[in-house]
Amino acid sequence: MLPILTGVVVVIPVLFMGSLVMESFFSIPGLGSYLLDAIRAQDFAIVRAMVFLGSVLYITGLILTDISYTWADPRVRLS
């Protein structure tokens, strides 16, 4: 169960970046097209915010994985 939980964490940023690429490829209005327009316009504040959002999602996923380890395996304890 623990390797499955670890694999889920790896998928979170991939899903986020995949949605950005898919939105830009299919011209769907959303964060992906917004980010690409900001990159083209060299609006670094927006790019910085999107990188921050991605890193917060990744760190949140890591924390949730550590907490779920205690649920999946009783030998693992938070301390």
Image (spheres, rainbow, N blue to C red):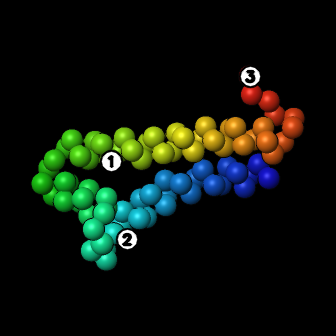
- In the displayed structure, would residue 76 be above or below residue 55? above
Looking at the rendered structure, which numbered label has been put on residue 22? Answer: 2
At horizontal 30% and vertical 72% (from top left) the residue drawn is 28
At horizontal 30% and vertical 42% (from top left) the residue drawn is 49
In this picture, residue 54 sits left or right of residue 47:
right
Mark 3 surroundings within 10 Å by alpha-carbon count, few (fewer than 14), some (14 through 19), many (20 or more): few
Three-letter residue code for mark 1: Met
Q: Give the SS element for disc 3.
A: loop
Badges 1 and 2: C-beta atoms under 8 Å apart?
no
Q: Give the SS element for disc 1.
A: helix
Q: Earlier in the sequence, mark 1 or mark 3?
A: 1
At horizontal 70% and vertical 51% (from top left) the residue drawn is 5
In this rendering, the count of numbered labels is: 3
Disc 1 from disc 2: Cα separation:
16 Å
Badges 1 and 3: C-beta atoms under 8 Å apart?
no
Name the residue tied to disc 1: 50
Three-letter residue code for mark 3: Ser
Residue farthest along the left direction in this orientation: 41
Name the residue tied to disc 3: 79
Q: Position of residue 41 (x, y in %)?
A: 12, 54
